[in-house]
Image: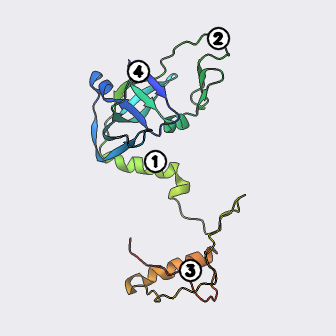
Amino acid sequence: GTKAHCLLDSGCEGIMISSDSVRANKLAKFELEKPVILQLACMGSKSTVQYGLTAKILLGKEKYEEYFDIANVNYYNIILGTPFLLRFEILLDFKNNCVQMVSPSVVATYGSSKPGSRRTKQHIYGVQSRISLNESDIPALREAWQNRYADIFGDIPLELPPFREVNHEIKLVDPSKVIRYRTPRCPEALKEQLIDKINQYITARWWRQMSTQQAVPMLCLPK
């Protein structure tokens, strides 16, 4: 493996490796189907990520696969942002000048554990090798993501969300104003979908049937 100079950046939303490190270690890369805009902290300053790679990293005593965007990173070989910190439950302890990893599979502390003690440098990440991905890997990756985020990809629960401490509402500028408009019509091809949606929303009590002088027009558009 190759030791890398890493930055743990809680203000970065990506996981990046410098293009110089990719060339120096002769890591295989692949071109992204859609380039990603890399927005920097300075207003009007941005770059574009066009290539990426997947490599193994050494974290503690375990190896993990991680995807990296290839960018023109300066000074550091690798920048590990908030997605990486969240995944491994890494805490940046500025008070004690150390890094704590509290993930069940990784329990370690790097740096000074006591205030005032001399800090020791630790190389905790290393680029090992690149594992290529192809189209045959997509079904397995899709299934893994769907299982991991089942609460997002699953069916929508037919119930109202719980009340929060702050509940928002949209107030009309002039409640007494009557808006005159042409009654919208749903295309015949979409009427069945509209009826199913209305029944679903009424069952979940998201909508209520009632009489009113006017209502907000609704457009029915195919997706």
Disc 1 and disc 3 in contact, CB within 8 angstroms = no
Q: Which residue is mark 4?
A: 4
Query: Residue 182 location in percent, x, y?
Result: 46, 89
Is tag 2's residue or tag 3's residue first in the polypeptide sequence? 2
Q: Which residue is mark 3?
A: 199
Q: Quadrant of the C terminus?
A: bottom left
The residue under label 4 is which amino acid type?
Ala
Is tag 4's residue or tag 2's residue first in the polypeptide sequence? 4
Which secondary structure lies at badge 1?
helix
110, 64: nearer the viewer: 110
**Which of labels 1 and 3 is toward the front?**
3
**Which of labels 2 and 3 is toward the front?**
2
Looking at the image, which residue is at 39% across and 85% down?
187
Measure how far apart labels 2 and 3 are at the Cα level: 66 Å
Q: Which residue is mark 1?
A: 144
Which secondary structure lies at badge 4?
loop
Q: Is residue 218 left or right of residue 159?
A: left
